[in-house]
Amino acid sequence: MKVMEDSEIRIIRHYSSKHKILLVGEGDFSFSLCPASAFGSATNITATSLDSEDELSKKYMDAMVNVSMLTRFGCDVQHEGSSSASAVRRKRGDSYHTQHKTTYPFSDWEIKRLAKAEGLKLVKAESKFELSHYPGYTNKRGSGWTSE
């Protein structure tokens, strides 16, 4: 594994190797692996899944390979985790990025209201997620016979 010098900053889209990144609700952990691979390290990344390791291995063919790679990159991987942005120590000037579908049932999450309740405010909204910006990421369903 390559060790980055403090002066070396790597960027992939909205994420920097200097950001403290919390990824909540990972499926097969392929999204987390994208910035980790781009940065050459994941010591600044915490990736969580609501599933246990056993459930992950049953649901997603590549999940445990991705978890293993993330661990080698130094990622804090948490299973059966209910982590949230409020669990991350905040300081003035911190920013949070969230990406989620806005169609039903995801619209019922009321993400803007939840953020406001945590003292956060919306600065910018992008209307389209570009899969091509995140090499290696494959969208997975969280449950059912189509989860893989």
Image: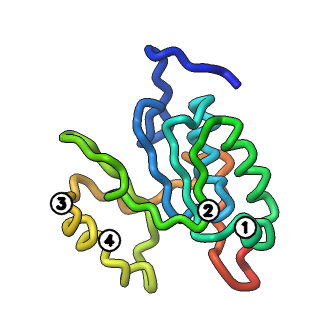
- Tell me the mark number nearer the camera, choosing from 4 and 1: 1
Badge 2, how many Cα within 10 Å: few under 14, some, many 20+?
some
Q: CA distance from mark 1 to mark 3?
A: 33 Å
Q: Secondary structure at mark 2?
A: strand
Lower sequence index among marks 3 and 2: 2
Q: Residue at x 71, y 51 (%)?
A: 67
Q: Amino acid at mark 2?
A: His
Q: Which residue is mark 3?
A: 119
Q: Residue at x 23, y 41 (%)?
A: 91
Lower sequence index among marks 3 and 4: 4
Residue 146, relative to residue 86: is it above or below?
A: below
- Tell me the mark number nearer the camera, choosing from 2 and 1: 2
Left or right of 83, for residue 143 = right
Q: CA distance from mark 3 to mark 4?
A: 13 Å
Left or right of 133, for residue 105 = left
Q: CA distance from mark 2 to mark 1?
A: 9 Å
Q: Which residue is mark 2?
A: 79
Question: Across the whole image, how many numbered discs are drawn on residues?
Answer: 4
**Nearer-the-camera pick, 41 or 130:** 41
Q: Amino acid at mark 3?
A: Gly
Q: Secondary structure at mark 4?
A: helix
Q: Are marks 2 and 1 in contact (CB under 8 Å)?
A: yes
Left or right of 116, for residue 80 = right
Picture coordinates of residue 93 (x, y %)?
21, 40
Lower sequence index among marks 2 and 4: 2
Q: Which residue is mark 4?
A: 111
Q: Secondary structure at mark 3?
A: loop
Q: Amino acid at mark 4?
A: Ile
